[in-house]
Every structure is written in structure tokens, then in C-alpha cells.
Amino acid sequence: MVVAERKPIEEILAMVADFKKVLLVGCKGCVTVCCAGGTKEVGILASALRIARKKAGNPLEVVEHTLERQCDPEYVDQLAPMIKENGFDAVLSMACSVGPQFIAKKYPIQVFPMLNTTFIGGALEHGVWAEFCQSCGNCIIHNFGGLCPIARCSKSLMNGPCGGSANKQCEVSPEIDCIWHLIYDRMVELGKVEKLRTVFPIKDWSTSRDGGPRKIVREDLKL
Amino acid sequence: MRLDYPPNVRIVNVPCTGRVDMLHLLKAIENGADGVYVAGCHEGECHFQNGNLKAKRRVAAVKEILKEVGLEPERVEMFHVAASDGPGFAAAAREMTERIRRLGPSPVRGAAEEDPLWEGGGAEAMST
């Protein structure tokens, strides 16, 4: 999933400093699963903003709403009557950064992102998420025991480990496992360690961001 | 035991403090409570294994939010009081009331909403 985290409330308060009434929109997709922008987080942020502004003697009306997803136009369309009738000064989106862009494209109103979209990852345990994919556009993890050296090696080395690997840790931080250590262990476990003797060729990055923003077109799915 | 505790404390019963949500605490503050505290079981003594520890972490998270919005984090607190410990419950109520009295009324209540009868320490307790 896309993993995100809420911006500091201080930064958000500065964004809405001039507003009296805002629409805070959550998303029931990835950011609900990573507890950053679902219905509950919308409630918590709305409450925090109201408390801060009541304290400042300049109340802010925050209307809460959560869409099924903000990355599909048909759900973003559902905001139309709310935005048309309620006289909001701005829309605050609690989705990954796709959401505020979809809302901005559709409605002539200022849109602010409430989250920092951080990475594509998964949950290691309750409350802990880690990066697992950098969406390079050409998955090669089967060559590395199913582990990704692009997203999970600090240098994205295709032929590791580097000299900074020590005691299973990356030199960047003791918090980071050396993925090349894990790849080696995994290949030993699979009985395929000899495969690591082959030098992996230079990766073709044309499927990554090198060609500018990417697009997928599926003619079979078009209406 | 007929123990006295400050009358300004309003009790909200929950089956276990693990039921207490960050929103419960925030909504109380948002609606003008001067303080909120959670009275849960002692650590390691939760009937549902770890509800009190979950509550403790949530109280800590709400304290962080209050800090971020410029409110005293001491306005929310977690107390550990055994279900049978009446004197401990009364002591927690007194401690929180005294603390709130020191901090003064919540600045979240606007001038218009100010209670002329405020004597210090309108607190909500969430207790098992």
C-alpha cells in the first residue's frame, strides 16, 4: 500500500490560518490501512484543529467526510454537492498526494495536503511500516531471493553488499537491515547461492522515472 | 467506604480502558472539559490482557496532540487504580482536580462559554 503520515499540526494550522470553514476529506484506501487518513484520523485532526482555533479565539468550522477512495474520479465527484452548497474556504485532503490533485483538478477551490506521502510499503507489526518497493517499473526481485535491492538497499546496489555492511546492518543506520546480507542468507536457504556469483547487468531504468510521469493504458478495461 | 472525592469529576464508565479512544479524550477537551483522566487497572492486571497499556499509549498520543495545539499536556492523564481500590480512586480524583486548579480553566472554552461558577477542576474521568 501507499504509506503516509500526517503533517505536523503546526504546519496544517499555518495552512488554514486565514480560513473560517474547511472541508476535511479522508480516504478509505491505503491511508486508512496505514492509519494516516481514514475516518478516525479525520476525526482526530478535525478535533485538534478545532481545539487550536477555539483556544486562539478564532474558531474554525471543520466539516468531516471520508470518501471510498480519492484516486478514482467517480468518488471525488461525490464531493460536488458539498463543495457547491457549503461555502468552504478550502478543502483539506487526508489522502496520499493523489487525492488533493484529483480534487484540485475537479473543483475551483484551494486544496491542501494533510499527509506526507512517504513510500510503498507494508506493516512490520501494528504501528510500524517499512518501505518495500520503489516502483521502478520492472520487477526483478526473483533474482534476489524475493527481496528488493532497489528499495531496500540504501544505494540500490544490484551487486552487493557494499563495504558499509557490518553485523547485518547498513552503515546508513543501525535501524536498517543490510538487504544484501538478507539476500545472501535467503539464497543460501533456497540452495541458490551460486546464482549470486553472476554479475547482474546494469538495470534498464527507462521503466522508472527516467521517461517522465508514467501512464498505464488498458484498452480492454475502457468503457 | 463512603469516601469523598471532588464533586467536579464526572465519570464515564467503560468496560475496560482499552475501549478509550483518542477521540473520546479530544472531544471532551474540544467541548470544554478542563481536563480528562483515564483510571485503568494496574499494569499487568488487565482482565483483557493489555487494555490498560493500550489506553496508556493513547493518552500519551493525545498529550502530544495537545502540545502541538498549544495546550498543556497535563490536562490529560493516565492513572492506574485497582478496581477495588476506593481510596486510590479518590486520590487520583483529588490529584487531577488539584492539578487542573493550578492550570486554570481550559482556554478552549471561549469567553462567552466561561462558567461564572468555575471553582477550578472540571474533569472527566474514564474508569473501568
Image: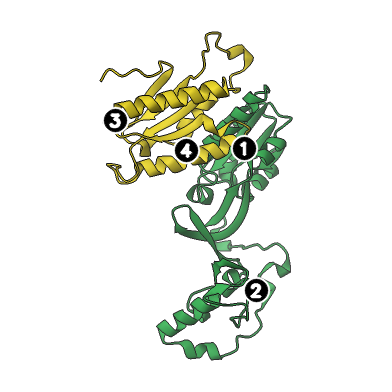
Chain colours: A green, B yellow
Q: Identify the residue under disc 4.
A: B59
Q: Identify the residue under disc 3.
A: B85
On screen, residue A223 above or below A80: below
Disc 4, SS: helix
Q: Identify the residue under disc 1.
A: B68
- Residue B18 location (% of width, % of height): 37, 39
Q: Do the CB atoms of the residues marked 3 and 1 lie less than 8 Å apart?
A: no
Mark 3 to mark 2: distance in Å? Answer: 57 Å
Q: Quadrant of residue A160?
A: bottom right
Between disc 4 and disc 1, whose residue precedes? 4
Look at discs 3 and 2 and give the one toward the viewer. 3
Q: Identify the residue under disc 2.
A: A155
Q: Quadrant of residue B56?
A: top left
Q: Chain of mark 4?
A: B
- Residue A208 location (% of width, % of height): 66, 69
> Do the residues marked 2 and 1 share a common chain?
no
> Do the residues marked 4 and 2 share a common chain?
no
Look at discs 3 and 1 and give the one toward the viewer. 3
Packing grade of label 2 (10 A; few <14, some 14-19, many >=20) is few
Residue B34 shows up from this direction: no
Identified by mark 4, the residue type is Val
